[in-house]
């Protein structure tokens, strides 16, 4: 009797299946990330209409605000892998306890971050920035500092929703916040509907309003979902759970440190750009906003990969976890290759989204920004790789060693080379951007090697 041979599934097919599953989860996360960065895009565009000096003030203010925000947000992102692994294992109690401690952590971190941001003007003055830029940045920071509490609460609830594969509500809420941001900027910056014209301070208050609006909507949605009732998120929120609070911090602080280390490379680049001149600082703000906007797509893919990897680990399926991580890298590389080409072919048109190309006072800023976009094109692919792999490693709860690799890459390679090229070697803004490229490339290689090794282990 002859038996028919069982057909072997082509090796490429599981990756196609994984790519579809990853994109189904990643698409709303990517849209959410783009909506988040759109707040900064809208602020930059609208403040850009006030001139280069207010734009430079917002650049410095955002440097302080987002560095404090990124570190706190990184710690809270530990909610994601804790929930995703518990979700994969069907552990409802751990899901609820992880989210509750995420909310407690958001409250604690928010208080510390508020103190830093509210007093950011003093820090900028210590860093030797021009007094006019410091005063503008300080006024902006005092307004936006009140938004740190609701933003971190949003991060905790968002990490939970995405980890249980329910990201669409977050996307709709954040998109609605973009429209509100445009309206509030228009009212508060330019003095519409009877309000005084607050200039760049108005955009700080607008952001605070949007963050509060988004958090309250997501909180209400989470409380009303019957599917979340078994997790008892809010019914048992009366006091911290020391065990899970410590576990959240243990996993989360290296994530926050890694993100802070990467962001500090960009922050210190802004500070050093301010030493070169206001024109270079304003141009850098435009170019880095472009790069930050495209970065949101691989960041969203990396967050989806973290969920997919975490759920596979919870199910004790390590080959599936490896496949999920590598799929995220491939998707990120494909997208960032396209954006690199766009930066190379249409730099002036892209800069025109932020600045009036016909205004005589903008010509020096435009020329420098167009040139810097060429360097932004150079680091698109490696930036996509490093953030996708970082997400996959977080899904494995591997956070400490990636933090060490981040220190070596961003500070040991990126920051040092950028400073040496910019100042001792006299390359100015070009040298600083070459440092960014080298730091991101180093991180991409080291993190990819680590993921390849860990994902092979039984």
Image: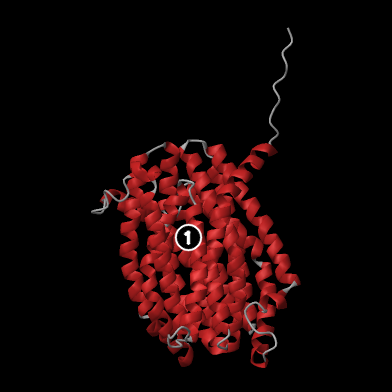
Q: Nearer the viewer, residue 287 or 353?
A: 353
Q: Is residue 129 left or right of residue 363?
A: left
Instruction: Tell me which corner region of the image, top left, top right, bottom left or bottom right, holds residue 299.
Output: bottom right
Let me know if residue 140 appears in the view.
yes
Q: Nearer the viewer, residue 363 or 75?
A: 363
As rendered, which of 281 and 154 lies closer to the eye? 154
Instruction: Please determine whether, in this image, residue 382 is positioned above or below residue 343.
Output: above
Would you say 249 lies left or right of 450 here?
left
- The N terminus sits in image quarter: top right
**Vertical position of residue 96 compared to residue 432: above or below:** above
Q: Residue at x 41, y 47 (%)?
A: 83
| Residue in the picture at 63% in, 82% down | 355
At x 61%, y 47%, the residue is: 326
Residue 193 placement (x, y as % from top left): 46, 83
Seen in the picture, residue 8 relative to 101 is either above or below; the reply is above
**How many marks do you count on the picture?**
1
Q: Residue 128: in sight, yes or no?
A: no
Residue 322 is drawn in which quadrant? top right
Foreground of the two, 56 or 177: 177
Residue at the extreme front of the image, as rendered:
193
Q: Position of residue 12 (x, y in %)?
A: 69, 39
Q: Which residue is mark 1?
A: 173
Query: Of all residues shown, which one is farthest toward the top?
Result: 1
User: What is the residue that sits farthest to the left in this orientation?
Assistant: 239
């Amino acid at each position: 009797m002859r038996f028919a041979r069982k057909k072997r599934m082509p090796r490429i097919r599981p990756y196609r299946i994984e790519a579809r599953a990853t994109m189904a989860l990643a698409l709303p996360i990517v849209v959410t990330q783009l909506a988040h960065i759109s707040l900064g895009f809208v602020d930059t565009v609208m403040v850009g209409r006030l001139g280069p000096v207010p734009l430079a003030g917002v650049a410095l203010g955002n440097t302080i605000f987002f560095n404090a925000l990124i570190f706190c947000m990184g710690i809270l992102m530990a909610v994601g892998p804790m929930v995703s692994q518990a979700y994969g294992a069907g552990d409802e109690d751990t899901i609820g306890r992880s989210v509750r401690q995420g909310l407690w952590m958001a409250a604690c971190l928010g208080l510390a971050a508020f103190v830093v941001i509210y007093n950011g003007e003093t820090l900028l003055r210590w860093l030797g920035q021009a007094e006019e830029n410091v005063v503008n940045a300080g006024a902006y920071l005092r307004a936006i500092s009140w938004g740190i509490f609701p933003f971190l609460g949003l991060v905790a609830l968002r990490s939970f929703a995405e980890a249980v594969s329910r990201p669409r509500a977050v996307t709709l809420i954040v998109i609605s916040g973009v429209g509100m941001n445009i309206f509030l900027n228009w009212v508060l910056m330019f003095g519409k509907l009877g309000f005084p014209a607050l200039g760049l301070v108005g955009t700080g208050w607008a952001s605070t309003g949007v963050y509060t609006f988004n958090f309250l909507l997501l909180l209400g949605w989470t409380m009303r979902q019957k599917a979340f009732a078994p997790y008892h998120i809010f019914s048992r929120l009366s006091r911290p759970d020391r065990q899970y609070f410590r576990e959240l911090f243990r996993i989360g602080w290296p994530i926050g440190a890694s993100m802070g280390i990467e962001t500090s490379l960009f922050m210190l680049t802004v500070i050093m750009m301010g030493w070169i001149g206001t024109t270079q600082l304003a141009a850098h703000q435009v170019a880095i906003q472009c790069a930050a906007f495209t970065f949101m797509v691989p960041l969203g893919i990396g967050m989806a990969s973290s969920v997919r990897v975490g759920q596979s680990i919870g199910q004790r399926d390590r080959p599936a976890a490896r496949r999920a991580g590598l799929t995220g890298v491939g998707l990120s590389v494909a997208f960032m290759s396209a954006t690199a080409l766009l930066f190379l072919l249409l730099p002036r048109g892209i800069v025109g989204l932020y600045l009036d190309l016909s205004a005589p006072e903008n010509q020096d800023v435009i020329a420098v920004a167009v040139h810097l976009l060429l360097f932004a094109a150079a680091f698109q692919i490696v930036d996509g790789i490093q953030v996708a792999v970082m997400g996959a490693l977080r899904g494995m709860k591997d956070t400490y060693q990636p933090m060490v690799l981040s220190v070596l890459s961003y500070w040991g390679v990126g920051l040092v080379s950028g400073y040496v090229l910019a100042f001792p070697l006299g390359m100015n803004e070009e040298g600083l951007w070459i440092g960014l490229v080298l730091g991101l490339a180093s991180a991409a290689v080291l993190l990819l090697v680590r993921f390849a090794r860990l994902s092979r282990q039984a």
